[in-house]
Amino acid sequence: MTKSNIFDFLFIFFIFLFDRLSKVLILNITEKSEKSFFEITSFLNFTLIWNDGIAFGLFSFNDKLFYNLLTILIMLIVIIIFFVMIRSKGYEKIGFMMVLGGSLGNLFDRLIYSSVPDFIDLHYNDFNWFIFNVADIFITLGILLLIYLELFKKENA
């Protein structure tokens, strides 16, 4: 195992750990206070919801079979992302590492809680964005980085 590989896995672990700590903190706070809503600023609340769908609550159903099939599909995608990340270099690798770290955080919750705790609630006046978590931030940033690299990649002529 090279120093680069050690850094890669530490980076992924840091994202996973940051996500886990944020979720454990919000779960402990909501349990102790018996509240699921906390106003932080005029545009940010912490509102705990349990997401049993995929990104931003899409495909959220009460069917346990569908949930389990979706979880298996997510596991397969995480494995594919891992192998693609190993073969990547530079910023592309960082993008895949961000997606992988966030995905592992949400997958952990799906396996342990059968749902993902989301709690970051951004809003402006009557506009509310989907409630999300730290893992979602890293997944989104990683995907945006990969899209940017794909769109503006310099081809060797």
Image (tube, rainbow, N blue to C red):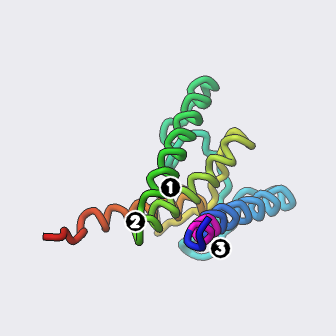
Which residue is more in the foreground, 41 or 120? 120
Is any part of residue 152 visible from this angle? yes
Coordinates of residue 20 in the picture (x, y in percent): 71, 60
The local secondary structure at tag 3 comes to: loop
Residue 11 occupies quadrant: bottom right
Coordinates of residue 48 in the picture (x, y in percent): 68, 55
The amino acid pointed to by label 2 is: Glu
Residue 12 lies, with reference to residue 79, above or below; the image says below
Q: Residue at x 52, y 63 (%)?
A: 98
Which residue is more in the foreground, 57 or 110? 110
Q: Is residue 143 left or right of residue 130?
A: left
Which is in the foreground here, disc 3 or disc 2?
Answer: 2
Q: Residue at x 44, y 52 (%)?
A: 84
Q: Residue at x 50, y 48 (%)?
A: 55
Q: Residues within 10 Å of mark 1 (few under 14, many from 20)?
A: some
Q: Which residues are magenta?
A: 5-10
Residue at the front extreme, as displayed: 1
Coordinates of residue 24 in the picture (x, y in percent): 77, 60
Q: Residue at x 53, y 39 (%)?
A: 76
Query: Disc 2 marks which residue?
Result: 92
Residue 95 occupies quadrant: bottom left
The amino acid pointed to by label 1 is: Phe
Which residue is more in the foreground, 38 or 147? 147
Q: Residues within 10 Å of mark 2 (few under 14, many from 20)?
A: many
The local secondary structure at tag 2 comes to: helix
Q: Are marks 1 and 2 in contact (CB under 8 Å)?
A: no
Q: Residues within 10 Å of mark 3 (few under 14, many from 20)?
A: few
In terms of sequence position, does the residue under pointer 3 or pointer 2 come before the other?
A: 3
The amino acid pointed to by label 3 is: Ile
Q: In the rendered image, which quarter contains the C terminus?
A: bottom left
Residue at the left extreme, as displayed: 157
Query: Disc 1 marks which residue?
Result: 130
